[in-house]
Every structure is written in C-alpha cells, then in structure tokens.
Amino acid sequence: MPDRITSWHPAPSRPRFAPPAGAVDAHCHVFGPMAAFPFSAKAKYLPDDAGPEMLFALRDHLGFARNVIVQASCHGTDNAATLNAIAKSGGKARGVAVVDPAISDAELAALHDGGIRGVRFNFLKRLVDAAPRDKFLEVASRLPSSWHVVIYFEADILDEMREFIAALPVPVVVDHMGRPDVRQGPDGDDMRAFRSLLDSREDIWFKATCPDRLDARLEGGMGDPWDNFAAAVAPLVADYPDRALWGTDWPHPNMQDEIPDEGHIVDMIPRIAPTPELQHKLLVTNPMRLYWPEEV
Ligand code: 0GY
C-alpha cells in the first residue's frame, strides 16, 4: 500500500480578509476517516484522514459559515464520507456526489435527502480511469430537481468538452475554471477559450479557486502569493459576477510538494473580488442560489 499523504497546512494563518456574514466555502472535501469510510480500491492517491471535525474547525478559523463538500476521487462513488460530514454539520454543509451512472432514481433521491445538490463528472485521467460521456448525459437527465453538474477538466481538452457541456440538461459548474494557464494572463488563449464557453450558456458557473494549483511554483508559476492567478482571474470575476463561486479546496487532494496556507488562500479573495458587493456575490449570494435555494 502506498504511503498516506498529508496535503494540508498544519497551522494555517488567520486571514487578514474577513469574509462577509454567511460566507460559503463552496469547494472542499473530506477524507475518511479511513477506519469508518475506507478509500476506493481505485483511488489514485491515499490521503491521511481529514474528517468533518477538522473541516469545521478550519471553517470557523477562516471565518466562514458553511461548506459545500465535493466528493473526492479517492472515495470513488461511495459517498458515505461526504454524507457523514454533511450530517454532522447541523445544516451548515451540503454536497456534490460522484455517482455510478447506473445509480437508481431512488438512490439519487436518498442523496438529495442527505444534502447532496449536484454530481461531479471528473475528466482528469490522473484521477479517474474512465469518463463515459454518454452515461454521464443519461444520469444528468435524471437528477433531482434543482441539482446541477460539476465538471472537472483541464484547459487542453476544453474544446472537446464543448459538445458534451452544451448537451447537459441542467446548470453546469466548472471546477477551477477548467484549469487555465494563468501565466498567459487575463487575455491569454486559455482564458479567452473559457470565456467563450461561459458565453455559450448563461447557466455555466465557475469556481475561481485553486491559486495554489494553477500558479504553483513547481510548475513554473509564481507560487504564494500567486500574482499570476490574481491578475488572470480578477477580470473574469468582474465580468461574470453572478456565476462565480469560491472555495478553499481543503484538504487539497494530492498536493504534496507545495502545501498552501489556507489563510493565504482566503486573502486571495479581495484580490479577485475587490469590492464588498463582489465579495458578497462570490461568497454568499451565488453559492446560496445553488446550494440552499430555499433560503434565497
Ligand atoms: C480538487 C482537485 C483535485 C482532486 C480532486 O477528487 C479529487 O481527487 O478533486 C486534483 O487533484 O486536481 O478539486 O480537489
């Protein structure tokens, strides 16, 4: 068995930026704990335990009110760890599941009762073995009402994703903006391609997330304080303010070499959303519309 990875900061700093009341961390995960919720036999990485108590302690430390917990690939299509965390949150968390496309309607309804509001389709070959588009489309046509699809792909396959995304019958949320090369700047090829995708449908949302992944020093980026990310992403948030979401990505699946300080990740917020109005949309209004629509 490979060694288990610790991918989160041992003592994150307290951010200088204070999120508005009711702020939602709309992209985070839980790992295990493994003794209760074993990892998938197909997992591409084996993380240390990062359970709900740790997530909620970080939420409070960073000044957030709620979490959207996205099922991580290391748990495969068994959403028990995610559902456990949602159940323990006292209503302060909802989630996004990863499902076997053969899932029954009754199982989807049970996920809804457990606080799930979307499914994630992952197209990263380093994380999953297969991404069967026809089966994804079929299950997307059977989702409970008010759910959406979260889709994770990298910029090099954006063009081949267009037809699939156009065919999805529910709103679409793109993880980490489809991982553009932020070193190209706000007008680079990757950001222009992503903008044209956003322009193709009014119900495509994006997560303005992961400066640590997109601007990693090890991959030729700036590293913390991630100036390339700030420069490339701020204009996108300004131009599409009603479709942007934000999250910590804690516990940063699979990150081993450049573990980010979550306090610094929070301090990216005013750099990509400089006004209180934008910050409120990014952190409160937009995630509430998708995940707690009954409260909006
Ligand atoms: C992320 C990014 C990654 C991993 C996963 O489910 C996952 O394992 O999402 C990644 O490795 O880029 O959003 O957490």
Image (spheres, rainbow, N blue to C red):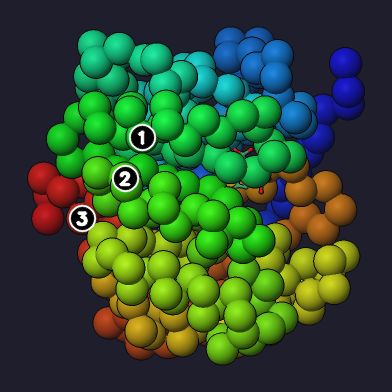
Q: CA distance from mark 1 to mark 2?
A: 6 Å
- Foreground: 234 or 94? 234
Residue under numbered circle 1: 137
Residue plotted at (51% across, 20% down): 77
- Residue type of the residue flagged with mark 1: Leu
**In which quarter of the view is residue 170 placed?**
top left
Q: Secondary structure at mark 1?
A: helix
Does 92 appear above or below 2? Answer: below
Residue under numbered circle 3: 289
User: Answer yes or no: do the residues labelled 1 and 2 have beta carbons within 8 Å?
Assistant: yes
- Residue type of the residue flagged with mark 2: Leu
Question: Which of the two labelled residues, at mark 2 and mark 3, occupies the earlier sequence position?
Answer: 2
The mark found on residue 168 in the picture is 2
Residue 148, x across and y down, in percent:
29, 43
- Foreground: 226 or 261? 226
- Foreground: 123 or 280? 123
Does 172 appear above or below 245? Answer: above
User: Answer yes or no: do the residues labelled 2 and 3 have beta carbons within 8 Å?
Assistant: no
Q: Residues within 10 Å of mark 1 (few under 14, many from 20)?
A: some
- Residue type of the residue flagged with mark 3: Arg
